[in-house]
Image (tube, coloured by chain):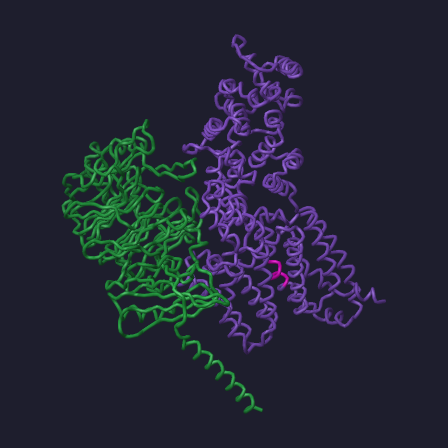
Amino acid sequence: MKAYYRSITNVFFGFILILLCLQNCADPIPADYTETGRLPNIDPDYTGIVVPVNIAPLNFKINEEGSVFYIDIYTDSKDGNHIRIKARRNIVMIPIKKWKALLSRNPGKELYIDIYLKGKNTRWNKFHTIENKIAKEKIDSHVAYRLINLGYALWREMGIYQRNLENFDESAIFTNRATKQNCMNCHSFCNNNPETMMFHMRAIYGGTIVVKDAVVNKVNTATEYTMSAGVYPAWHPGGNHIAFSVNKTVQSFHAGKNRNIYVWDIASDLVVYDIQTNTITTSPKVATKRTENLPNWSPDGKYLYFCSGPKRESKDGYNISKYDLMRISYDVETNHWGDVEPILTARETGKSISFPKISPDGKHLLFCMSDYGYFSIYLLSSDLYMLDIEGRQYRKLNINSEYSESYHSWSSNSRWFVFASKRKDGLCSRLYFSYVDTLGNVYKPFVMPQKNPTFYDTYIKNYNVPELIKGPVKVNHWNLMRGAHKTPIQSKFDSTVNIDALSGATKAVKKESK
Amino acid sequence: MRIKTIIRNPNFSFLFFFLFLFFYYLLVFDSSLYYHYYQPIFLFDTTYLKEFLLYPGGPAELIAPFFLQFFYFNLLGSLIIAALSISVFITFYKLIKKIGDFKYSLILSFLPVIFLLIIQNNYNFPLLVSIKYLFVLILFLAYIKIPNRYKALIILLSFVIYYVLGGWAYLFYIVLCVLHEVLYRENRGKYIFAGLNILAYLIYPYVAARYFFIITLKETYLYIAPLEFYTWPFNFNLNLYCYLFFISLPILQIALSVYLKYIKVKVKKKIKLPAKLHHIPAQSIFIILTAVLILTFSFDKREKKKIMIDYLAEQGRWNELLNISRGMEEYNVLIIFNVNRALYHTGQLLDNLFNYPQMIGADVLFLENQPTPGAIQVSDLHFDLGHIKAAQVMAYEGQTRFGYNPRMLKRIVVTNIIIEKYVAAKKFLDLFNKSILHKKWVKHYQNYLSNESLIESDSLIQLKRKLMPKSDFFIAVNKYSYIDLIRLLKENENNKMAFEYLMAYYLLAYRLDALLENLDNFKSLGYRKYPRHIEEALLIIGFTDPSRNVKIDYSIDQQTIKQFKQFNSILSKFENKVQAEKALRKEFYNTYWYYVHYICPEIKNRE
């Protein structure tokens, strides 16, 4: 009896094995087909792009009528390696191991995708070959972002997450579940280093969490001489200072159908926080009656770039305010401020500049320009521009859409950047990656790949403030939580700063607080 | 003889009790109101499902919205809630039977059910707590049956129970297991198993919080329901009855153990008596009577009315809304907010506004300066007014605050279609399509996206497109919402609701000068006479400033003038208006004069 069962089992497993073998030895490429004479319609649009050698499989959906699909992925190398997938659904899920092998063996080569399809009783149709390129340079392995809902004033669940770009793993760095659903925002990393980071928490457990060398501290960066706690951050490359803007921000909602919200500042200034001495300093030069905002350090740490808008007058329309791009030298060792110098003004461009981000190699400055204002993610007109720092020439990038492009961040090797765009549905921001070659040419972006290529169709959260990082954030959520639950350490205001020379706005706050 | 056998069977009691509960929930409780209150949704969507797997207790909570979505139909909801309650009852009964054969097993099993009926008789109570409770009972029943040789393994694997049910339910399970080991086992290993259970409770939640889930220590050990249930509008709290519900079984375990140990002989004797079965019908009757009493006394009719009013407002059943709100004794901002909407929709806003207590004045019109975020209701009001973007902003806020709320998702879809954002509408329709309950609704609007003529023939969408502002401005907030009414009127002078709400605002805020400036509009909007409260306001103006020349298009009703004279005559009889209040309240509580003298917050603040 036992032998009988054993033989049945053997036959069964043998059958399974044969099936598996047949599955692996994919059908041959259809030999008899008709050329459609056009590119296939695939979603996401992974055509004509440059991809990092270490990116996760670019799974996609074929938006073409068919009942059988045949996909052939290969490069122009002579090794003859192909990934061949035959599917009865229009969802293409590329096996990750084969994909990794194909890309890692062919950096710098062309990457081709052939798509064939046929109906129930029709012949095979073949579309034009999709031609992409595999870049030699890797992208930083992770991207950190905040996931937020579509509401502007209320919130519930919120968190800062990290995604491994080499596969599909997403994990929470920290969520507000452990902090009574408070608000958390403006996460930032120093030199793309996942070990050195910060983020703010608002309302309950309010304060700024600063993580350095695996030590978690919570700081209150609001002082009696600053109009708010630190808002938009920029790590000094040295890792011991963070420049912040301090802002009095207002949200206004549009009643017209084409715009949603306008975020603007009644006043804003810049400050620099010294992590080691727990001191906030500023200068009358960056705390003027104008609205200084959105700081960013040059990679050598000698200059602080920032945006500067005119002082808002009550009679002004909301769409008047336009920001210039400025910089000021600052020596973190001696606490010495140089003079403010304009880099690119709204008068020159006719537009408003925001979120300046300098590439780590110091060659390019990526920024947003919109018709007015600075909170570019909510501005339809916001597009990405690039300034050649040496030549001071700027240009609009050909990667923009009719919707907002914003929140860009460079990879540590300066060859890639990520940005948030609402191009897919005009509503939710998604992450896109673009390649930048050594000459500064920027290539067609591609959306962050997901295991399920239809994921974005019904996902209703926004990807917010993406930051490329060189590896996963290792500080444990437990330590972050313990840090978050602590009473914040009160920062000191630099006693050497002449507070009477600071902006009227700051003084007004000073008065109010008294 | 056969009937006797049937009625002496406990299963008959359970069936009888189930039917009783079913009809109670169907006819009195109205399970569809529970749906309206929670707006649950279950999506066959990986992202949605994943959200429940990210914290201990989440997997069990996934079951709740699946069942709760059927509460949309009162019949199904009542069946489910009755089935849940009876399942708890039956499991208790089986547990008691497992402990020993008692004369009053049925009544003993019913004791914890008493508390379940009380807490479940409240719309604020999250059903997922009962579901977790039932799970624990079933798991405990299984634990009792496990032979000792597998017990250590089961305790070791109990982290799965912790993950599925969460800290509080796990604690409850562990307490039951420990008590069972200590009180009912007679082997030597009982203390070891009890100790292992305690150890599991101490270790697993800690490890979970320390290494796997982003939750606090308090949450990891004592989590029972998501944070949003503790906040508005649910405001759930673990009250005395909840605690009694949870501790009743451990207390029973202890009490029965004592009983068995010290009165063992007696019990043994009685077990031998087959006549014990005749207690069953009597016990059943006792249980039903007790349940009737409990359910009658623990049911909060006012809470039901509150939810019913919001439900009727959502349905646009305005006359019914006004009918049931008439008897409300308690002042509630949300009720008055909806009553005011109903008054407008039934053409009574400016005639009967003060038939209802307008205690907080103009703020009630837009739910302004309120501590609770009534995003859903405010979105409804803006939608009524044709202030579509404002309705949409509040819908997005509501969606953010309350998650996948069907009411908000529907609003987002419709407003996006109205403002011609079809891609955004499609996104939400595709998402909504993952719910089995709303497919018909989704199909209806999906057709719109591929067929513009369907949109053109939809009168609601066309009306809203006509009413919505064509020019852009910033939506007013915080005490300034009335400015948007002026803007809406500027955009479309036939927006009658905006006009009446503006007039109501001027009345409530005692801004009679502004009211006078808009007096002409009554004629242009086709009114045949001034509404009652406008007449009352005009009489106040004439009385306080007789020299003022007010141009009016309609004469004031003689009855109103007569009443005004009476009001003033009563007022003049008293030394001051405070003393006159009682005399005036009886006859004039529903007049603008009474509101101005005794309620209007603007005037009170000035005084």
Residue toward you, B502 or A350: A350
In the image, what residue occupies the spot 78% across and 63% down?
B279
B582 sits to left or right of A35: right
- x, y (%) of residue B405? 52, 48
- x, y (%) of residue A456? 42, 55
The chain shown in purple is which?
A: B
Q: Which residues are magenta?
A: B247-252
Quarter occupied by the N terminus of chain B: bottom right
Decide whether the magenta segment is chiefly helix, strand or loop: helix
Task: Please indicate, yes or no, whether residue B145 appears anywhere in the rendered image.
Answer: yes
The chain shown in green is which?
A: A
- x, y (%) of residue A294? 26, 43
- x, y (%) of residue A112? 32, 65
Task: Please indicate, yes or no, whether residue B361 appears anywhere in the rendered image.
Answer: no
Residue toward you, A233 or B49: B49
Up the image or down, B358 lies above or below B557; here it is: below
B6 sits to left or right of A134: right
Taking the magenta stretch, the answer to whether it contains residue A301 is no
Q: Total number of numbered labels?
A: 0
Q: Quadrant of residue B312?
A: top right
Up the image or down, A478 lies above or below B417; here it is: below
In the image, what residue occupies the spot 42% across and 75% down?
A27
Q: Residue furthest top?
A: B547
Taking the magenta stretch, the answer to whether it contains residue B249 is yes
In the image, what residue occupies the spot 46% across and 56% down?
B219
